[in-house]
Image: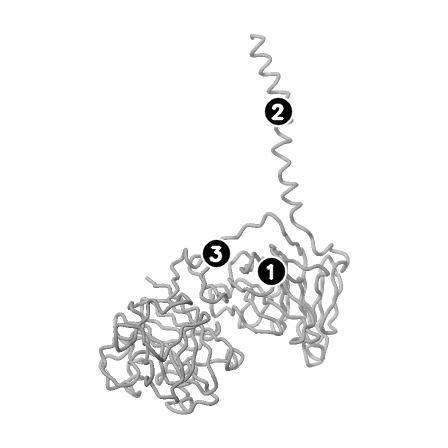
Amino acid sequence: MSFFRKSLLLAAGAAAPLLFSFHARPAAPAAETWQNLFDGKTLTGWKRLGGTADYKVENGAIVGTTVANSGNTFLVTDKEYGDFDLELDVKIDDPTNNSGVQTRSHFDSAEQPGKVYGRQVEVDPSARSWSGGIYDEARRQWLYPLDLHPQAKTAFKVGAYNHLKVECLGNEMKTWVNGVPVAYVVDPIDPKGFIGLQVHAVSEAAQAGHKVYFKNIRIKTTDLKPSAFPADSYVVNFVPNYLNAYEKQHGWKLLFDGKTSQGWRSAKGTAFPAKGWEVDNGTMTVLPSEGKEAANGGDIVTNAEYSAFDLSFEFKLTPGANSGVKYFVTLAEKTDMSAIGLEYQVLDDALHPDAKLGRDGDRTLASLYDLKTANKPPRFVHPIGEWNVGRVVVYPNNHVEHYLNGAKVLEYERGSPEFRALVAESKYHIWPNFGEAKAGHLLLQDHGNRVSFRSIKLKELK
């Protein structure tokens, strides 16, 4: 063996331990980027806020126990966090109990005196099964109920530890339960705040003593990268007239740019109405005209027509106002009033008389106007003067769904015998094949009352 070859072999042999050490060490720095928020033994770094429920450490877990006649009680971190990945394991044994994990939350404001408030990852063992959904504690209530992602309802297991993952990066918040993607919210408020563990309020002595368990709580605040989410996920986006990168990537388009009337025209002409509508401050607003239907600017429609789609829009009512969002509008029907089409009703149910007309409330907010009544829990109706989120999904198989602030309020099948029977009993019975066009315009209605729209976005479905 030559001296040169022998030297190479010796050098390689000498270097081998160094190479082995070099490849084995990167795991340690990666692990160090995670910080344990719970040491497994004490409640150091945490404090109790809100109610009087009990928190203690048992067998390496934080155990919260319900107390009768206490409000919601939270064990929260001393520190506040901005961008982070959070992971923990949660167990809840009683399906009548409820819990949650606060993120970027706060305590005691003028609007919420003595209360914890902020975005919460729901822990819901009930038959509703909304675990992993996002709730705004003591403030806006539900932001992402699992009506928006029903496939994720089975991820949470009652009586076992469930692994929760929460990602907060900038305005975006995503959740996972046992590795299953659940909720995706884009929200411009609360850039930082504390992490909290909830014991839910109970009012009866029989509900006292129920427990919820938390362990393996850790957080990562550096070297953060957004995690992938399934392509068909619906994003609740509270930034007005804005699509994030995920929405753009997966086919969503803004139908209103927040600045101009581009893409819209009068239902009775080729141009946008010269009066009766106002585009200002990020909204498209129909101006009042004493409640006279289509008497001022008239209805406006999209230039484009759509067949199967997911449509989302925000609307704000003034007291006693009436309007609507119509779909499958062909403009073939001749009428001096509002153009004809399937209508998502936009209405002040308390003050406008239309709410008491029709059959069984089928002219109330979020209903399929004059055809099918929206079944909407009161907590999903935002007050007059605040923004509400409407949504209409028309699938390629003609199944249709209406949502209000994330809650599914009705569904039906276009063209089915049941649908045609509803039409036959309605004001639309005079129009042949009403609501069954293959494609049509979208319409915002001028019913003579001031109503504003924004964040109108659509994804075509195939």
Q: Which residue is mark 1?
A: 162
Q: CA distance from mark 2 to mark 1?
A: 43 Å
Q: Which residue is mark 2?
A: 16
Instruction: Using the image, tell me which numbered label, if any, was put on residue 35.
Output: none
Above or below for 311 versus 337:
above
Q: Is residue 73 left or right of residue 326?
A: right
Q: Quadrant of the N terminus?
A: top right
How far across and down, in percent of the image, does residue 439 sit? 27, 70
Q: Which residue is mark 3?
A: 229
Q: Are marks 3 and 2 in contact (CB under 8 Å)?
A: no
How far across and down, in percent of the image, does residue 334 sit? 22, 82
Closer to the chain start, of discs 1 and 3, is: 1
Closer to the chain start, of discs 2 and 1, is: 2
Q: Report the mark closest to the observer, 1 or 3.
A: 3
Question: Residue 203's quadrant in the figure?
Answer: bottom right
How far across and down, in percent of the image, does residue 430 sit? 24, 86
Which residue type does callout 3 highlight? Phe
Above or below for 275 versus 183:
below
How far across and down, in percent of the image, does residue 174 sit? 54, 60
The kind of secondary structure element at disc 2 is helix
Q: Quadrant of the C terminus?
A: bottom left
Residue drawn at x 52%, y 53% as measured from the top left = 227
Which residue type does callout 2 highlight? Ala
Q: Nearer the viewer, residue 59 or 283?
A: 283
Q: Report the mark closest to the observer, 2 or 1.
A: 2
Above or below for 4 versus 208:
above
Q: Report the mark closest to the observer, 3 or 2.
A: 3
Which residue type does callout 1 highlight? Asn
Q: Nearer the viewer, residue 394 or 452?
A: 452
Q: CA distance from mark 1 to mark 3?
A: 19 Å
